[in-house]
Amino acid sequence: MLELLEILKYILPSVVVFFTAYYLIKIFLEVEEKKLSLELKMDAKNITIPIRLQAFERFTLYLERINPQNMVMRLQKSTMNNSQFQMLLVSTVRNEFEHNVSQQMYISSASWEAIKNAKEETIKVINIAFGQIEPTGQSIELATKIIELTADDTMSPSDHALELLKKDIRQYF
């Protein structure tokens, strides 16, 4: 029995030191892991923020370019008839959209829906205006009709989508 007490006298302090060291090392490693995780998140943010800003810029440009009044002024040529001009306007809206579709992953779902809605509403306005005029007339007729239809709107679909984009971007700054 005396021998067992003698052995315990040496082993017990060793066990206490071992568990204390284990506990301290475990806490240290957990803190280091949290630091590393936070550092990785900060690095990822530094990479994604410029990409998100670029997406917001591209969608802002898209919405400005598909605004019916801006688009009519930019694309109208006197050499086209209404039918050709209508096809040009609709294809421009769709091509611009397809060019920027991959940027949707960097904006909110609400903003993306507003952008899609702006695209569809712009095409709808173009088609409504085209339906109210003679297809073979000069393209200035279609341009005038589109401007007339959109002049009454206080806030176009493009403007609404721009407001949502601005609201989203304010969250980052």
Image (cartoon, rainbow, N blue to C red):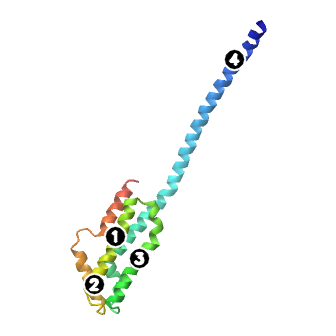
Report how far apart the C-alphas of labels 1 and 3 lie in the structure: 11 Å
Judging by the rendered image, the residue that carries numbered circle 2 is 131
Q: Comparing marks 4 and 3, which lies closer to the viewer?
A: 3
Tell me which label, 2 or 3, sits earlier in the chain: 3
Report how far apart the C-alphas of labels 4 and 3 lie in the structure: 77 Å
152 vs 63, left or right, is left
Q: Comparing marks 4 and 2, which lies closer to the viewer?
A: 2
Mark 2: few/some/many CA within 10 Å (<14, 14-19, 20+):
few
Judging by the rendered image, the residue that carries numbered circle 4 is 13
Q: Report x, y in % for residue 11.
A: 73, 17
Mark 1: few/some/many CA within 10 Å (<14, 14-19, 20+):
many
- Which amino acid type corresponds to the residue marked 4 in the rendered image? Pro
Report how far apart the C-alphas of labels 2 and 3 lie in the structure: 19 Å
Residue drawn at x 53%, y 44% is: 38
Q: Report x, y in % for residue 83.
A: 34, 88
Report how far apart the C-alphas of labels 1 and 4 lie in the structure: 75 Å
Q: Quadrant of residue 88?
A: bottom left
Tell me which label, 2 or 1, sits earlier in the chain: 1
- Which amino acid type corresponds to the residue marked 1 in the rendered image? Ala
Q: Comparing marks 1 and 4, which lies closer to the viewer?
A: 1
Q: Report x, y in % for residue 47.
A: 52, 56
117 relative to 86, above or below: above
The answer to the question of whether label 1 and label 4 lie on touching residues, with beta carbons closer than 8 A, is: no
Q: Nearer the viewer, residue 130 or 17?
A: 130
Judging by the rendered image, the residue that carries numbered circle 1 is 118
Tell me which label, 1 or 4, sits earlier in the chain: 4
Report how far apart the C-alphas of labels 4 and 2 lie in the structure: 93 Å
The numbered disc on residue 94 is: 3
96 vs 76, left or right, is right
The answer to the question of whether label 2 and label 1 lie on touching residues, with beta carbons closer than 8 A, is: no
Helix, strand or loop status at disc 3: helix
32 vs 148, left or right, is right
